[in-house]
């Protein structure tokens, strides 16, 4: 009986941590068009680290239809995307050392997947954040809201 109770507690604990993980880890897919599978990500403010996994389900290569996931404050999006264009594909279209960039993933093409994590310490609760793709020309359409709740 004692073992059963311990197992029951262990089960509840594991279930709770699975639920907690659900709002810290995000799977996002993209394809041969200018669209993320989500236009809003709400992460839990109890997360220490947020992990984004980006999967490209299209067929086109990354120099034609590359996508990545970049997070900045809403007011920095245009400037970061513009500076990123001249940084080139080798830099994932993100200006090296750009302090306005909170997190960014590698640029991927069709059939590829990439994953990246960042600390929640960089997110302020009173600021509006946007995630977008920094491939030249994509940020106008490929973007979404990032929120902590
Ligand atoms: Cu893109």
Image (tube, helix red, strand yellow):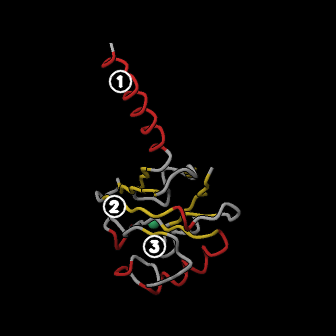
- Residue 127, position as x, y percentages in the image: 68, 65
- Residue 26, position as x, y percentages in the image: 45, 50
The quarter of the displayed image where residue 7 is located: top left
- Residue 88, position as x, y percentages in the image: 40, 83
**Residues marked 1 and 2 touching at CB (< 8 Å):** no
Closest to the observer: 98 or 29? 98
- Report the disc number at residue 81: none
- Report the disc number at residue 114: 2
Residue 55 horizontal side relative to residue 83, left or right: left
Front disc: 2 or 3: 2
Is the shortest distance between ligand 1 and the CB of mark 3 under 8 Å? yes
Disc 1 versus disc 2: distance between alpha carbons?
A: 38 Å
Query: How many residues crowd mark 3 within 10 Å: few (<14), some (14–19), many (20+)?
Result: many
Residue 143 horizontal side relative to residue 106, left or right: right
Tag 1, which secondary structure?
helix
Q: Is residue 83 above or below residue 54?
A: below
Front disc: 1 or 3: 1
């Amino acid at each position: 009986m004692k073992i059963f109770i311990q197992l029951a507690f262990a089960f509840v604990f594991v279930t709770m941590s699975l639920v907690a993980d659900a709002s810290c880890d995000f799977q996002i897919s993209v394809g041969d068009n200018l669209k993320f599978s989500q236009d809003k990500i709400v992460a839990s403010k109890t997360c220490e680290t947020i992990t984004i996994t980006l999967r490209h389900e299209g067929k086109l290569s990354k120099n034609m239809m590359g996508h990545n996931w970049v997070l900045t404050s809403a007011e920095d999006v245009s400037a970061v995307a513009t500076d990123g264009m001249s940084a080139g594909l080798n830099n994932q279209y993100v200006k090296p050392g750009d302090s306005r960039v909170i997190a960014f993933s590698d640029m991927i093409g069709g059939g590829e997947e990439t994953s990246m994590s960042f600390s929640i310490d960089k997110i302020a609760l009173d600021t509006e954040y946007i995630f977008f793709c920094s491939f030249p020309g994509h940020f106008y359409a490929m973007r979404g809201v990032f929120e902590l709740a």
